[in-house]
Image: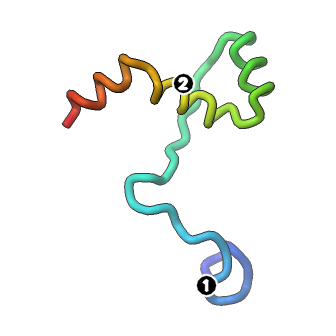
Amino acid sequence: MNGRGGKREGAGRPPAPEGEKKVPYATKLDPVVVEYLRACGNGARAIEQAIQRSKAFREWLANRR
């Protein structure tokens, strides 16, 4: 037993594919931004979507390869 997902062999969520596992990242934010993120329900997803939709991120992504 690997300690995750229950006692049955193969129980639980499968691991994320390589390169898709989320990385913990802590930072300090403006209180108003935190209030907004809490109102969104899934603050991490809201941050990811906002960044991924930005022109600066898309340009950076295109030039990083």
Badge nearest the viewer, 2 or 1: 2
Comparing 4 with 61, the one in front is 61
* Image quadrant occupied by the N terminus: bottom right
| Image point (58%, 24%), residue name | 27
Q: Which label belongs to residue 31?
A: none
Residue 59 is left or right of residue 28, and the answer is left
Residue 37 is left or right of residue 64, and the answer is right
Q: Which label belongs to residue 50?
A: 2
| Image point (39%, 60%), residue name | 18
Residue 22 is left or right of residue 64, and the answer is right
Q: What type is the residue that disc 2 sits on?
A: Ala
Comparing 4 with 58, the one in front is 58
Image x and y of residue 60, in percent: 29, 24
Mark 2 and mark 1: span between their CA atoms?
36 Å
Q: Which residue is mark 1?
A: 10
| Image point (69%, 74%), residue name | 5
Comparing 57 with 27, the one in front is 57
Residue 54: quadrant of the picture: top left
Q: What type is the residue that disc 1 sits on?
A: Gly
Helix, strand or loop under label 1: loop
